[in-house]
Image (cartoon, rainbow, N blue to C red):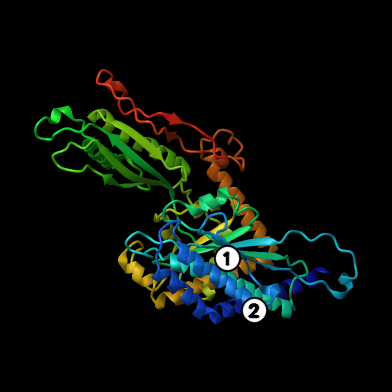
Amino acid sequence: MRPNEAGEASSATEVRLEEWKRWASECIDESSECLGELSREIWSHPELAFEEHQAHAALTSFFAALSVSSSSSAAWSVQRSYKLETAFRADWKWDGAPCSPAETNQATPPSPPPLRLGFLCEYDALPAIGHACGHNLIAEVGAAAALGLKGALESLRQNPAGLPRQAPAVKVTVLGTPAEEDGGGKIDLIKAGAFDNLDVVFMAHPSQEDAAFLPDIAEHDVTVKYYGKTSHAAAYPWEGLNALDAAVLAYNNLSLLRQQMKPTWRVHGIIKNGGVKPNIIPSYTELEFYLRAPSLRELSTLKEKAENCFKAAALATGCEVEIHNNETDFYNVLPNKTLQKTYKENGKKLGIDFISDDSLNDLTGSTDFGNVSYMIPGIHSYFYIGSDALNHTEQYTTAAGSEEAQFYALRAAKALAMTALDVIFKPDLLEKVREDFRLTKLKEEGHLNVPGNAKGSDNALGKMKWQTTSKQPFQSSKSDMKERGKTIMTDQALQ
């Protein structure tokens, strides 16, 4: 092909790509009623982490019903209880550009593996306030974006004009990922191999604004248990060791630490058990804290400071302490500027008004998608749902179940499907996405003090695990007060 012919072919593909994106949007609009019913069903039956049985049934039945109404070549392959009891997987494959009649009679080399694109659904709720983070909408958006992409690719089977000869085969995967709010279901799925071989992943989260990226930060959960000694609080309090005093001291220690904390660090927690009766000196208390920082390295520093606060409280009160560190930390979400730029370009065509880049310095929450972003290039965008209510409030629960939210959720799904089409039909874009991922991950790993990470190897993060305490309480002795509050630490490697 001569240079001018190549340019003309590229221009024709660009024109057709916009048409294919319109097909994806139209497919989502045609399915809007059943998608809205799916979202409302999940919203009406809020379920906690790893208990999302009705949501799991609704989503798997949704894709199974689509398969029944389609031809065998267009059917979704649905796997219920995929790796986890309330996780699922639905797959569909497009074979890529058809062969010309001349090519059909020629021996062709083996086809390369398909481009594997994943759309993620979340569907767990919060205790007491239901879907106050709008995970019913996340599930709907993931399903809708996958349907839109599938619809556009199916249309190309009937009308392949303008299709690049080297268009790859595509496997579209919808992954149902439970327990984002508590437990990190995606982390379990990573360990089980559910994300292996995926090339790019897509998801969108409800918010108060539209953004292609917000800085979700790293999070570590810790449970602290203090053991004291009961005694009558009025008759002979000196015989007791007050575990509640230790808990209060630990809480106040962390409050005082905030003066020396970076503005981007967050520490917040509760006292889960504070005793049983005022006239009994508490012999047991329990606290739960979340520690957050913009990067894994800063999180490690914050964790050490927090542990010193916990140990100091044990030392001051004479109590024994156990510090139980959660082994499923949420990583900070790695940005992918190429995907973000492409998503914004598509979103603007749909009328999305994105927040300014100046707002990207504002902290948000944490998500187990961060762990995924260290494995695979991906985008975790945010979308407005027609309400200024804040996430994790009763008002947001109402907004997430409203009819108004449907327009915004499906608009976000269209932007994701359109972005996926760009990834498929713009090979240079896919390479840029992969290069962004590689460089961003190397930069992040280069900030970590991880053995074997001198060259920023791709496996460095896989070798790191937070230090965790033993579950045995510390030996307490009145004759050896210096030993109070010390922890027994173990250092293991992530498998």
Observer-side mark, 2 or 1, equals: 2
Which residue is denoted by mark 1 in the rendering? 342
| Mark 1: secondary structure | helix
> Dot 2: few (<14), some (14–19), or many (≥20) neighbours within 10 Å?
few
Q: Amino acid at mark 2?
A: Glu
Name the one closer to the observer, 270 or 434. Answer: 270
Q: Residue furthest left?
A: 235
Sequence-wise, which precedes: disc 2 or disc 1? 2
Q: Residue at x 45, y 69 (%)?
A: 137
Quadrant holding the N terminus: bottom right
Residue 314: numbered disc: none
- Occupied quadrant, residue 316: top left
Vertical order, 431 against 54 (above or below): above
Which residue is denoted by mark 2 in the rendering? 19
Q: Position of residue 108 (x, y in %)?
A: 86, 63
Q: Is residue 393 visible?
A: yes
- Occupied quadrant, residue 224: top left
Name the one closer to the observer, 292 or 259. Answer: 292
Q: Position of residue 274 (x, y in %)?
A: 23, 43
Label 1 near label 2: C-beta < 8 Å?
Answer: no
Q: Is residue 211 visible?
A: no
Name the one closer to the observer, 184 or 207. Answer: 184
